[in-house]
Amino acid sequence: MSLIQYYGTGRRKTAVARVFLRPGKGNITFYVEERPHSFSDYFNLEKHQNIIKKPLHITETENKFDIFIRIKGGGVKGQAEAIQLGIARALVEFNKELKPTLKGLKLLTRDPREKERKKYGLLGARKAPQYHKR
């Protein structure tokens, strides 16, 4: 018996999510930094849960897949957005006809914004020491 699964990688800032969709009833298995967590306890804000489930809701596949997620790095919001991208990419692997719908809502586009590095002589990436004339 072969296991049917669809894979998608999502990244946001420093968060990297590996998402596997397997035919099932909508269960979510969730690992952060190799430790199992309860999905609703880790993402306790409803807005983060909505971010993650948005691609499933739009494509009406919410209860068709069991989701297995491994995530590393980043903060909670960055992780939620990385998972969203991973789920959207896995759904496209499942069914290519979903691509225009997801692409139209910008769910297949990686957000390229990263933290800017600190420069020498400055207090931060752009913040300079206070100027004084005398």
Image (spheres, grey):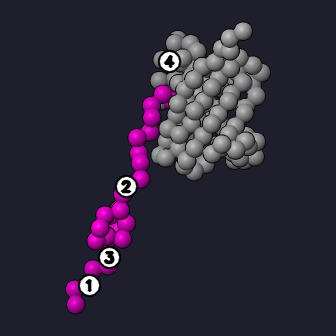
Our reading of the magenta stretch's main secondary structure is: loop
Magenta stretch holds residue 8: no
Neighbours of disc 2 within 10 Å: few (<14), some (14-19), many (20+):
few
User: How far, Cα to Cα, is label 3 from label 4?
Assistant: 48 Å
Figure quadrant of residue 40: top right
Q: Position of residue 24 (x, y in %)?
A: 75, 19
Q: Position of residue 6 (x, y in %)?
A: 60, 19
Which residue was labeled with disc 3? 129
* Mark 3 or 4, nearer chain start: 4
User: How far, Cα to Cα, is label 3 from label 2?
Assistant: 18 Å
Residue at point 65% right, 33% down? 69
Which residue was labeled with disc 2? 116
Q: Secondary structure at mark 4?
A: helix
Which residue was labeled with disc 1? 132
Q: Is residue 14 visible?
A: yes
What is the number of the mark on residue 105? none
Q: Magenta region: which residues? A: 107-134
Which residue was labeled with disc 4? 99
